[in-house]
Image (cartoon, grey):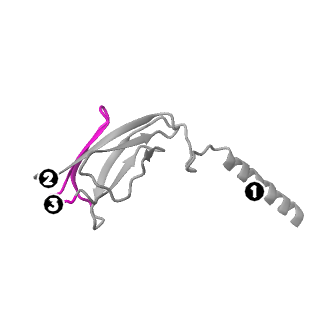
Amino acid sequence: MKNIIKIANILILCFLVQACNDFPVDDKGLLITDSEECGMTVFDLLGPDNRQTLVSSVINDDNNTVVAVAKFGTNLTHVKPRCSLLTDCIVEPMMGTWEDFTKPHTYTVISGNRKIKKTYTVTVTVQGE
């Protein structure tokens, strides 16, 4: 009886390993899905103290722009961007590192099926300047 249970466990393990291999992944090891949705839903900037610096941000999906306003006194030469995306999307280049936003940046959002791409231009100004 113990041998039957061991064999059954091995077969189940083999099935699970094979099932995991049925899902395609991209070159970064991220799951590729059937989703054709592609877009950015939230854009934010963190200051050197890792606190939110934006007063507002408007994402326009018609012309793929993000226009953001940072709090008065924000040093745009040392901020960290972050965003939220539609389900299964990825963004390139990756966000989350310290950057200089004194000039516009571009980010490409790629759908879950990796077939649809939208490039957003992000412009940040400082409140009152």
**73 in the magenta segment:** yes
Q: Amino acid at mark 1?
A: Leu
| Residue 84 is at least partly visible in this image | yes
The region drawn magenta spans 52-75
- Give the distance between the C-alpha atoms of the residues marked 3 and 2, in whole angstroms: 8 Å
When asked about the image quadrant of residue 3, the answer is bottom right
Task: Identify the disc placed on residue 73.
Answer: 3
Q: Position of residue 77 (x, y in %)?
A: 25, 57
- Residue drawn at 39 percent across, 36 percent down: 118
| Residue 1 is at least partly visible in this image | no
Q: Are marks 3 and 2 in contact (CB under 8 Å)?
A: no
Q: Earlier in the sequence, mark 1 or mark 2?
A: 1
Task: Identify the disc placed on residue 127.
Answer: 2
Q: Secondary structure at mark 1?
A: helix
- The answer to whether 96 appears left or right of 111 in the picture is left
Q: Position of residue 128 (x, y in %)?
A: 10, 52
Q: Are marks 3 and 1 in contact (CB under 8 Å)?
A: no
Q: Amino acid at mark 2?
A: Gln
- Residue drawn at 38 percent across, 49 percent down: 84
Q: Secondary structure at mark 2?
A: loop
